[in-house]
Amino acid sequence: MVTESPDITSYDTQLLDRVEALRSDAGLMEEYARRLRSTAATLDDCPAAPEWSRPALERQAAACATAAEQLRTAAEALFALARARD
């Protein structure tokens, strides 16, 4: 008796699309972190900037960097799942 495999091509395509979206989002988060750090550095030379602004921007940059790392981890996990299904 031969059984047919369900057609999973569209599922795999959607999964790989999600992997690419997560990787793209990770890149965006890294760019946001870079911009926040750049802004914080610029405020170092600005005497009118509140004292709390640089630490706040640095914390936000760190959160963006963490999010980028987590998004990449999720993308790699989904990619491994997609490859395992091949």
Image (spheres, rainbow, N blue to C red):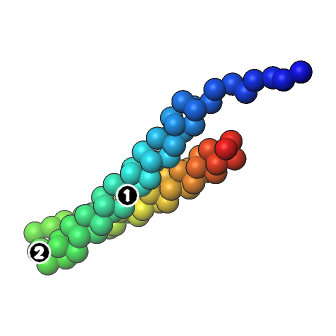
Q: Position of residue 74 (x, y in %)?
A: 56, 50
Which mark's residue is nearer the viewer, 1 or 2? 1
**Badge 1 vs badge 2, beta-carbon distance below 8 Å:** no
Residue at horizontal 44 percent and vertical 53 percent from the top? 23
Residue under pointer 2? 47
Q: Is residue 48 left or right of residue 39?
A: left
**Quadrant in which residue 57 is drawn:** bottom left
**Which quadrant would the N terminus be assigned to in this image?**
top right
Q: Position of residue 70 (x, y in %)?
A: 52, 55
- Nearer-the-camera pick, 44 or 50: 44
Q: Is residue 70 left or right of residue 41?
A: right
Q: Is residue 4 above or below residue 50?
A: above
Residue at horizontal 68 percent and vertical 42 percent from the top? 85
**Quadrant in which residue 52 is drawn:** bottom left
Residue at horizontal 31 percent and vertical 61 percent from the top? 31
Give the mark, 1 or 2, whose residue is nearer the N terminus: 1
Q: Secondary structure at mark 1?
A: helix
* Alpha carbons under labels 1 and 2: distance apart: 32 Å
Q: Can residue 63 be seen in the rendering of this structure?
A: no
Label 2 Cα neighbours within 10 Å, binned few <14 / some 14-19 / many ≥20: few
Q: Is residue 71 left or right of residue 25?
A: right
Residue under pointer 1? 27
Q: Is residue 84 above or below residue 35?
A: above
What is the residue that sits farthest to the right in this orientation?
Answer: 1
Looking at the rendered structure, the kind of residue marked 1 is: Gly
Q: Position of residue 84 (x, y in %)?
A: 69, 47
Residue at horizontal 67 percent and vertical 44 percent from the top? 86
Looking at the rendered structure, the kind of residue marked 2 is: Pro
Q: Can residue 26 be seen in the rendering of this structure?
A: yes
Q: Position of residue 34 (x, y in %)?
A: 30, 66
